[in-house]
Amino acid sequence: MGQRMKIASDLLSVGVSNDGSYVEYITYGENDIIKRTGDGHKTHGGIAPLFPYANRIRGGTYSFEGREYAFQRGNDGNSIHGYAKDLHWEVVEIEEDAVTLKTDLYREKEYPFRIGCTVHICVSGSRFCEVAHFHNHGDSGAPISPGFHPYFIVRNEWTVSLEKRALKSIKMDEYFPSGNYLEFYKNIRKKKAGHFDDLFRYSGPIRVLGERYSYEIETTNSRYFMIYDGEYAGGESVAVEPMSSTVNAFQSGEDLKTLNPDEIWLFGFSFTVQETSL
């Protein structure tokens, strides 16, 4: 069991565990606004850090600078959502309204890159913010494609509103992109039948409008986001997941970030919540 911590503002309360730098819950007043996991899996609720890569890598393998590597694979034969959520994180500092944690992403066979990661989580009024600082301490470049996995409680209906049209990634199969995109809508609404598990290319503010709350999302170095409202959303939430790169970027190289020696790079998101109605 990790160390469980609570930070709070006058409106928000946030539960954070250093087991995976995992946000277990966020409440607004007495009500949850981030869905809690129902089965203990960190990507089925809360806010999990998806480092060093978000979403899936086909077959778990990738090459970088002429060498081949392989991540641990899941039941579907692919690797998913990195491993930072499974690491022990050191608590650097904790205050009433903020906590800072750090870890090392180095893994000798899977990811032999000297990337130190520090995550700062804070609240102020009705605003929540989480920013990751990646620092390459090694002598060579390192690939990185991070994301976050927040589940926003919306109850039955939701709309994701954008400042401009997003480009929806066209899949070649159930999980992986073909590399082609279709211009989509500025307002993306819950389907009457079926669910979303889709990637969009988009940079800019995002508004998630639910039946009781709206969430104004800002991102740092995010060029994509996923929308997921399938089984693990529980019929009450929608996951809107900021990502720096496309799905499978470790193989395709599309928008994959290469962190140079001694480079520090930030990736993060924030949201402000307010009560509203559809």
Image (cartoon, rainbow, N blue to C red):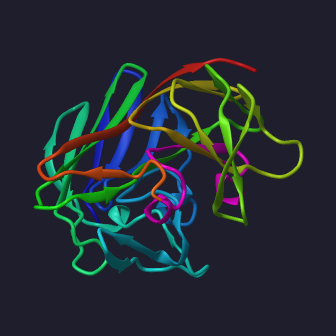
Residue 253 visible at all: yes
In this view, the residue in front, 102 or 154, is 102
Q: How many marks?
A: 0
Residue at 41% in and 52% down = 256
Q: Quadrant of the C terminus?
A: top right
Q: Is residue 237 magenta?
A: yes
Q: Quadrant of the N terminus?
A: bottom left
Task: Residue 135: give x, y in percent of width and height.
Answer: 17, 50
Residue at 55% in and 72% down = 58
Please tell me in which quadrant of the rendered image residue 85 appears.
bottom left
Left or right for 239, reference 220: right
**Residue furthest right in the image:** 193
Left or right for 54, reference 63: right
Question: Which range is magenta?
Answer: 228-252
Left or right for 228, reference 56: right
Residue at 61% in and 39% down = 153
Please tell me in which quadrant of the rendered image residue 11 appears.
top left
Task: Residue 112: give x, y in percent of width and height.
Answer: 22, 72
Judge whether 230 appears above or below 100 on screen. Answer: below
Task: Residue 189: give x, y in percent of width and height.
Answer: 77, 33
Left or right for 86, reference 165: left
Residue 240 visible at all: no
Task: Residue 195: give x, y in percent of width and height.
Answer: 78, 51
Q: Is residue 132 magenta?
A: no
